[in-house]
Image (cartoon, coloured by chain):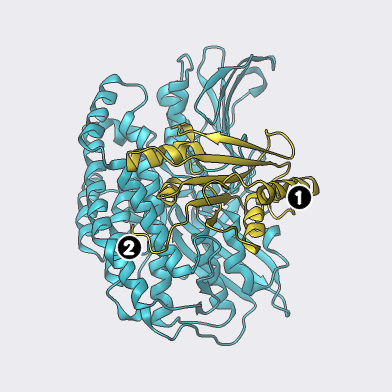
Amino acid sequence: MTSALETAQNPESLKRIVIEPLTRVEGHGKVTLLQGNNRNIRQARLHITEFRGFEKFIQGRPYWELPVLVQRLCGICPVSHHLAAAKATDMIVGATELTPTAEKIRRLMHYGQTLQSHALHFFHLCSPDLLFGFDDEVRHRNIVGVIEDSPEIATQGVMMRKYGQEIIRVTSGKRVHGTGAIPGGINKGLSREEVDYLRKDIAQNLAWAQSAVELVKKVFYEELDYHMGFARIDTSMMSMVNDDGSFELYHGGLRARDSLGNEIFDHIDYTNYTEYLRESVKDWSYMKFPFIKALGEEEGWYRVGPLARVNNCDFFSTPLAEAQRQEFKSLGDGLPVQSTMAYHWARLIETLHCAEAIAGLLEDPDLMGKELRTKGELQSVGTGVIEAPRGTLFHHYEIDDDGIVSKASLIVSTTNNNQAMNESIRKVANQYLDGKRLSEALLNQVEVAIRAYDPCLSCATHAIGKMPMELNLVDAGGQLVDRLEKRTTGQIDRTI
Amino acid sequence: MNRGATVAPVLVLTYGNPSRGDDALGTAMYDLLEKNPPLNVDLLTDFQLQIEHATDLREREFVLFVDAGINCEEPFELQRLSARKDDSFTTHAMSPASVLSVYQQIYRREPPPAYLLTIRAYKFGLGKEMSSAAGENLARAYEYLVEEPPWAAHA
């Protein structure tokens, strides 16, 4: 159920600490902590301010533009929106089944984007949290040792990211704003030269993915109790699975299990997702709060993304990832692994699976097939769901007689994790901030909890000067008593 | 990753989201330049900068980044960049200076001379058109690149 720290009694009498915007997550968000006179945390909320206007942006556009148009919703995961919209428009054009070439090229694109997204997060976004620590000299020394043992880590991250981007470029035609997936299929197959170009580097990327899993395990085990307990919340989890229960990123049914691993629903057709999921609104947040209808608003919130997917699936279809999954699952001793920091571990198991799946696809002659597109009778409704790198992504459209979008509904991955991120913040606030004097290091732990989810706060705007971090301290009377500003250069200034 | 195409000595790398109001300035500059491509100049555009863009700097003699900015002078500013591992290194959107730092890290040598052209922007709403003031700044910046290309000595 939701936390007692969501809403404080008499908030006007509390000090307000604002971390705005969050660093190392995408877009604009802020965390507000209301502190009582004895410095205990009385209220904790994550505000995400940019989830507005998506549906309006899409309405009024012709359906066939959707796979390209929606890429502009987010500069971080345009391919996820591209593919979810393409699946929805498949349904609109009556394409009940894609050609093997179309489906495999889309899958290749999706595995490529997931590989590069996860590699970026591990090697460059969360590495300060995992590898450098933030409050412990011993941990810091240990991790510096890891870096000294593995100076090539950063380079591997760049090269894996580049490889994934190259897969996207080859399959979608362009580095950005690609048009690979179209309603009912794809717009081009791959040439032998393109396949050979990608094959040259897959073995190296597979090896890097294997070593990355080993590295994250080493880091995790070094302080197992800490990593198991930090920001831990016990939640339901939802993800897509294949018909046989195996791990699935592109197409399958939805599975939800409760915090003990008991089935809530399984293999449901995602086109009926509104029968199983609802969204609530709260007056203090622009972002909605999805929940599982059968459990109700208070109990029905859940987590998505790598942790949910690796916990929920019965097995991986690729052997290396499956071996890693089994070790991961042993952490839970028969129950789902609920550690928030285990997101990092699960993310790298998925990275390994993607590398294996890419290697397999690059040996498949269907990639070079000529049958690219199917269609049937035009429908007025289309729903597309995929497992984006950050979690389950829903696109739902309705069109009028002229093919113009009259209604658009999206549940993006980060929205699915909205309540969970809020709960993790509250857990951290209780674990580490309550009753203590606030410092940048302590506040950073709040961000560490959020970053574990790899949230995309959906702001593809990045112009210079838009992304400083501001830390305000306001007393009970509403008076600003202190302020720290963290520049994009990392410089911190006290500006009061 | 192996590179498939011939690399021009000059790279102009623009970035921004064309559906985010004035954030489109970078990609709008790309569109203008692409209509009449300068000789010996490669043009690239992306939503935002990330670590892999360091690989696009290989074998270059000169690099120009083009972005929208809200703190620069009107109509635009040009500044020399130096590699700096700032905080953007750990965000989803990196600064150009941090991209140069990644270049240093992975290739273990100094990056090519690099400049940032920042075009003054004002509004960034999703689905909004570029503001007229930003459009005027874009036109001035484009004139500058055509008449006095900072890469002239390298192209």
Location of residue B27 by image quarter: bottom right
Above or below, A400 relative to A218: below
Mark 1, Cα crowd under 10 Å, few <14 / some 14-19 / many 20+, is many
Alpha carbon distance from label 2 to label 1: 48 Å
Instruction: Give the tally of numbered discs.
Output: 2
Residue A127: image tag:
none
Location of residue A171 by image quarter: bottom left
Q: Colour of chain A?
A: cyan
- Of residues A378 and B22, the one nearer the viewer is B22
| Three-letter amino acid code of the residue under disc 1 | Gly
Residue extending farthest right: B132
Above or below, B117 relative to B59: above
Q: Chain B is drawn in which colour?
A: yellow
- Of residues B19 and B153, the one nearer the viewer is B153
Q: Which chain carries label 2?
A: A
- Marks 2 and 1 on same chain: no
| Three-letter amino acid code of the residue under disc 2 | Phe
- Of residues A14 and A297, the one nearer the viewer is A14
Residue A173 in the image: state x and y as whole percent: 49, 69
Residue that numbered label 1 is attached to: B135
Q: What element carries label 2?
A: loop
Residue A341 in the image: state x and y as whole percent: 35, 39
Residue A247: image tag:
2
